[in-house]
Amino acid sequence: MQGFDADAAALPGSGLYGLPTTPEEAKVLVVPVPFSATTSYGGGAWRGPGAILRESRQVDLYDLDFGRVYTAGLAMLPEPEEVLAWHHEAEALARGVLAVGGAVQGDPLLEAALARVNARCARVNDHVLSVVRALLADGRQVALVGGDHAVPLGCIQAHAECHPGLGILHLDAHADLRVAYEGFRYSHASIMDNVLREVPGVSRIVQVGLRDLGEAELRAIEGSGGRVVPFYDHDLAARRFDGEPWSALVREIVNALPGEVYLSFDIDGLDPTLCPHTGTPVPGGLGFREVCALLSAVARSGRRIVGMDLVEVVPGPDGDPWDGNVAARLLYKMLGALRVSLDGAGRSTL
């Protein structure tokens, strides 16, 4: 990046965070997956990657938590036209299925629509798996941006193949352990159920911020044999009300993780004042500084963050930039934690 002025304003049409780095040059590639066909409440997450790219150009590049993150060599791939086409096709087909809550039995048209949506979702999974596998084989680090929370399955699978035994730090309002929710095998509400079923290389899922889940999901957590470790939002809040510092709770969360970590961040894990347009907002959740402290603790604990995703970002109506702005800054923090953990900078023992 010779001659690049990190303090200058980003130029219109410039790359991620206004950087001049091309995808061919980048060491860390952000993979956009504009697909959100199974969204069952608020829609629009397929527009999340574009919002993150657009608002990233407003982010100052020196980060007080992680330093000169941009020197890691960051770029975003173009949005794939075929995935956009699959999204629009599947979203249209899914409307009738969603209208009956997935109860399509006995209706041949809806049964066919459901089958086609499931096929399109499987195709997205195959696409993501192929793209991320190739990037990892080329020595790149990968961050996926969605799209809804169904889309990272292939990304998680590719990382688990390279790093068997990895753990997922899953920040979310929801457990996402529903089985084929509303008939969609790869629903946004089923991503962690699919990981448990299809990705044996994931040794543990540590879930933080859960505050909206079903009884079957609770039974799945309790019956996971320790493969799913929950940190419920109400428990974290109660312990803080009783005087426990956030740093002590963070230490407990980090100590539950294995040595290699994949970050999976549904933005609705945040306090919804920070992401009001996300598809399924829930009161409560994590503050921005709480998340930064957690990411910093993971990065400096001696663990290696090997990959990540950020999903369910929905830009506001009439060009409202707030959700995209918060998401772009959150992604920069996540990329900073990735850089610090891989560099081994500032490590400490928790």
Image: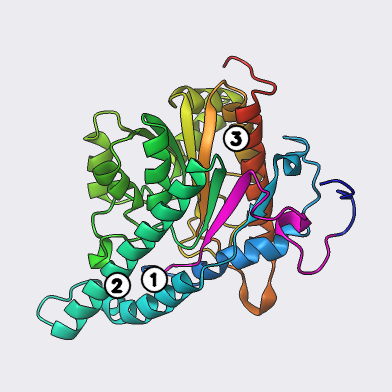
Q: CA distance from mark 3 to mark 1?
A: 30 Å
Which residue is rendered at x = 48% and y = 56% of the image? 282
**Is 25 a magenta residue?**
yes
Mark 3 or mark 2: whose residue is earlier in sequence? 2
Mark 2 or mark 1: whose residue is earlier in sequence? 1
- The vertical placement of 133 against 260, above or below, is below
User: What's drawn in magenta, residue-wise?
Assistant: 10-36
Which residue is rendered at x = 69% and y = 55% of the image? 22
Query: Is there CB contact under 8 Å for labels 3 and 2?
Result: no
Which residue is rendered at x = 9% and y = 80% of the image? 106
- Residue receiving disc 3: 295
**How many residues crowd mark 1 within 10 Å: few (<14), some (14–19), many (20+)?**
many
Observer-nearest residue: 349 or 286? 349
- Residue receiving disc 1: 37
- The vertical placement of 35 against 330, above or below, is below
Q: CA distance from mark 2 to mark 1?
A: 8 Å
**Is 210 a magenta residue?**
no
Which residue is rendered at x = 69% and y = 59% of the image? 325
Where residue 235 appears, as percent x and y from the top left, is 44, 35
> Tag 1's secondary structure?
loop
Where residue 267 appears, as percent x and y from the top left, is 53, 53
**How many residues crowd mark 3 within 10 Å: few (<14), some (14–19), many (20+)?**
many
